[in-house]
């Protein structure tokens, strides 16, 4: 651990660029502080990827809880997510807690035994994976993403491709080869983009398009049926339609979590019917009346000649 600390100390006098480096930002909160509920948030961004891995967690009230403890837990969870995502370094860790950053650099001493234990866990991760790591402090305004995650009561769920569940083998799914390629690409992408969801459509009606909800439920099984019913709860025709759509995508080979997201994406991005742009034709007012092919104001010169 001494080697890690001394290595990091040398970096304190350098201005480190994060352009070609992996990045972890973290933040922790405790309300009330101390002794309240703790919230932790982290964001992992790999240099060779176009997406970030977001995560957060909440811990119940405890007398030992405090803001510094929450910061360290957020950092540890961010480090665990980083190595799980196969991060190789070099890595820059950014936080808005000067105490945590300077303690990880070896500048500030650690006196609390709870903090010391987490510090040693983080140091073990760094040593085990031989990470080239740099710690950098930033003001809170530059750490808003992790800050919002730490204070959010809604759990951010992380789905890795290897953790996803599919109820249908994509190789035998009754779909076209073009759709098969698109679904396969989405299943292997941790965070599919909006463009991928937008381009995902059968193209034409397939075998599953004409099936009723009860037929889809029978094919998908109890677990998938329960998942669709939970996500789109209700017995209205609209909810049944959404449940059927989710099951269709699952049976086409799309992962369960992506199938649910696909249906929601389609609902949120459904185009409103265009209003008729045809202008109403204005009736022309006829200001003249025809009388024997002559104008109303025609004057017979012979009659009124002097």
Image (cartoon, grey):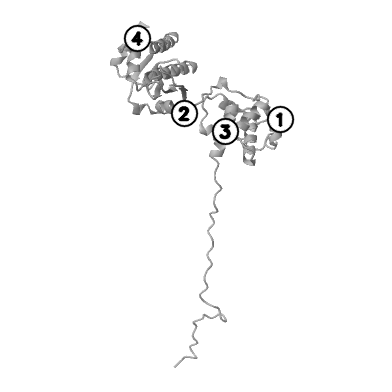
Q: How far apart are marks 3 and 1 (CA)?
A: 21 Å
Q: Which mark is residue 5?
A: 4
Disc 3 versus disc 1: nearer the observer: 1
Which dot marks residue 153?
2
Give the alpha-carbon distance from disc 1 to disc 4, as whole Å. Answer: 59 Å
| Image coords of residue 213 (percent x, y) | 68, 35
Q: In this view, does 97 lie to the left or right of 267?
A: left
Asked if residue 265 lies left or right of residue 177, the reply is: left
* Quarter assignment of residue 37: top left
Q: Which of marks 2 and 3 is nearer the N terminus?
A: 2
Circle nearer the viewer, 2 or 3: 2
Q: Is mark 1 on a helix, strand or loop?
A: helix
Q: Which residue was labeled with disc 1? A: 218
**Dot label at residue 261:** none
Q: Residues within 10 Å of mark 2 (few under 14, many from 20)?
A: few
Identified at 63% across, 35% down, the residue is: 243
Say which label, 2 or 1, has the lower sequence index: 2
């Amino acid at each position: 651990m001494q080697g890690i600390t001394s290595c990091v100390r040398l970096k304190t006098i350098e201005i480190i660029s994060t352009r070609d480096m992996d990045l972890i930002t973290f933040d922790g909160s405790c309300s009330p502080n101390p002794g309240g509920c703790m919230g932790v948030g982290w964001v992992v961004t790999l240099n060779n990827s176009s997406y970030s891995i977001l995560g957060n967690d909440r811990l119940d009230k405890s007398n030992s809880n405090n803001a510094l403890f929450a910061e360290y837990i957020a950092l540890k969870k961010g480090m665990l997510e980083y190595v799980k995502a196969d991060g190789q370094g070099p890595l820059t860790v950014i936080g808005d807690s000067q105490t945590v950053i300077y303690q990880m650099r070896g500048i500030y001493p650690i006196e609390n035994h709870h903090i010391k234990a987490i510090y040693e866990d983080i140091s073990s991760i760094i040593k085990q994976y031989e990470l080239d790591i740099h710690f950098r402090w930033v003001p809170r305004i530059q750490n808003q993403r992790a800050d919002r995650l730490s204070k959010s009561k809604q759990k951010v769920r992380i789905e890795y491709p290897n953790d996803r569940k599919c109820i249908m083998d994509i190789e035998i799914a009754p779909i076209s080869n073009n759709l098969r390629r698109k679904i396969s690409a989405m299943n292997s992408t941790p965070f599919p983009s909006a463009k991928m969801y937008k381009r995902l459509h059968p193209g034409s009606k397939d075998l599953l398009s004409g099936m009723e909800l009860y037929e889809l439920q029978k094919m998908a099984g109890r677990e998938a049926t329960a998942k669709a019913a939970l996500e789109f709860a209700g017995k209205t025709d609209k909810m049944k339609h959404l449940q059927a759509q989710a099951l269709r995508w699952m049976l086409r080979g799309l992962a369960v979590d992506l199938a649910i997201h696909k249906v929601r994406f389609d609902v949120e991005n459904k185009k409103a019917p265009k209003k008729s742009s045809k202008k109403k034709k204005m009736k022309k007012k006829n200001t003249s009346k025809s009388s024997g092919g002559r104008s109303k104001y025609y004057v017979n010169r012979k009659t009124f000649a002097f």
